[in-house]
Image (spheres, helix red, strand yellow):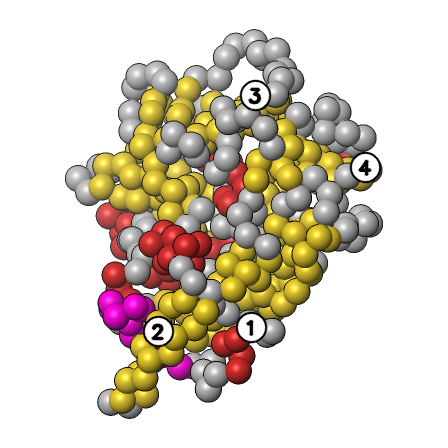
Amino acid sequence: MTPDSSRPPRARMPVVRRQLVSVLCLLTSVLWFLPGCSLVPRRPETPERTVMIKEPVLVPAAIIANFFLVEARQDDGQVRRFLVDTGSSATLVSPAFAAELREKEKRGARRTARVRGAHGAGVDLEAAVLRKLWLGAVRFERVPVLLYDLAELSHHLGVRVDGVIGFPHFRDVLLTLDYPRQQLVLAPRPAAAPPPRHSERAHTLAFTAEQGTPLIPVQLGSESFIVLIDSGSDGALNLNPAGLHPRFVAGPRPGKIVTAIGRDRRQLVGRLAQDLLIGTHTVAQPVTDLTEQLSALGGELLRHFALTFDQPRGLVTFTRDAPGPVQLLARRDTGLSFDRSPAYWRVLGIVPETPTELTALQPGDLCVRINGEPVEKWDPERYAALLRTATKVTYTFLSGAKETDFELPVVDLVR
């Protein structure tokens, strides 16, 4: 089977539980998100009705830390911000948002849904129905949602997030996540299926979404396998090597700490020697995070494309204007994993085999300034840009009333 194949054979499809959101796999805000949370298996719920006031609808987006975010005014008069997550089979909203726009339930009629982490631990989330949810000039009516406190995600991104919109929400429209132009496009689905596109610029693939999220075939070297298209993950390629034979030009080596429901794990990151093929698109020797969960394409890779999904027909088109292979940057860092809050960043862990491992810094230490500026001024995009270009970074840590500066070199975790 090659990426040019039609719908992947059922026998080759991995058995996966329903994806919820990568965000829910976090107990704390970490720079690297991990797919693998799930709902108790059931049919994904979708809005009862979708009304397009005009067509097509273009909604400006912001790409923050490789996440795709949009804003839209709601019936309560407030502009709300949403993360669009194709790796989620459900839509989450904050309790405060739901309180303003949810339908009233009959006494004793409240429901919950079980959300499980990649390693079995779980939580119960309250289910509700929103009367309406707007994205530009598209009105979604009677929208099923789960309530979740999104404060940790908001702290991580440096902006308030009111909801995470899952993939099934867009079943009745043609959905385009245009990363390069930073816009979400919603259009009516054509009555007849358009011809597949197989060119250097655009390639149409069949996807399966039996579990509520899109899975496509890709190719690594001469081997084919299945990946989740996960705009709710900020990495490039999360690769489960089971059954494959990946080769590396760098690593794999220990990376940052990823915190999931019920269990922490340390990344194992490297740069592959083989190219990744997505249809006719080539990703040259991608940086990858090895995982025991379902392989996935995250925002760091997806941001090179515009992705158009036709859910009922099970088709997704990857479009790229720039010529040549996708080139992913080196993974550079000072070796610190942080849990972010507005007042301070708490050290979660130190990457082994980095100069930082030789310092007196330990998990739990509190960073209050970076290069002399309070941490609240360092949103994810600005901090990532610093790590890409700087040779060293000065962190100020607080211990009681005493402040101590540590000047740490920025090193290539993966070239």
- Quarter of the picture holding the C terminus: bottom right
Q: Which residue is mark 4?
A: 222
Q: Secondary structure at mark 3?
A: loop
Q: Which mark is residue 354?
A: 1
* Residue 273 or residue 68, whichever sits in front: 273
Point out the frontmost of discs 1 and 4: 1
Callouts 1 and 4 close, C-beta under 8 Å: no
The residue where tag 3 is placed is: 201
Quadrant of the frame with the N terminus:
top right
Kindly tell me whether residue 386 is visible in this rendering.
yes
Disc 2 crowd rating (10 Å Cα; few below 14, some 14-19, many 20+) is many
Q: Amino acid at mark 4?
A: Ser
Q: Which residues are magenta?
A: 365-374
Q: Given the image, on which type of amino acid does mark 3 rest?
A: Arg
User: Earlier along the polypeptide chain: callout 3 or callout 2?
Assistant: 3
The correct choice, above or below, for 244 with respect to 318 in the image is: below
Name the residue located 68 percent from the left edge and 56 percent from the top edge. 250
Looking at marks 3 and 1 on the same chain, the residue that comes earlier in the sequence is marked by: 3
Q: CA distance from mark 1 to mark 2?
A: 16 Å
**Percent of width and height locating residue 154:** 34, 57
The residue at which mark 2 appears reads as 395
What whole-number distance in Å separates the C-alpha atoms at marks 3 and 1?
A: 40 Å
Question: Which label's residue is closer to the chain start, 1 or 2?
Answer: 1
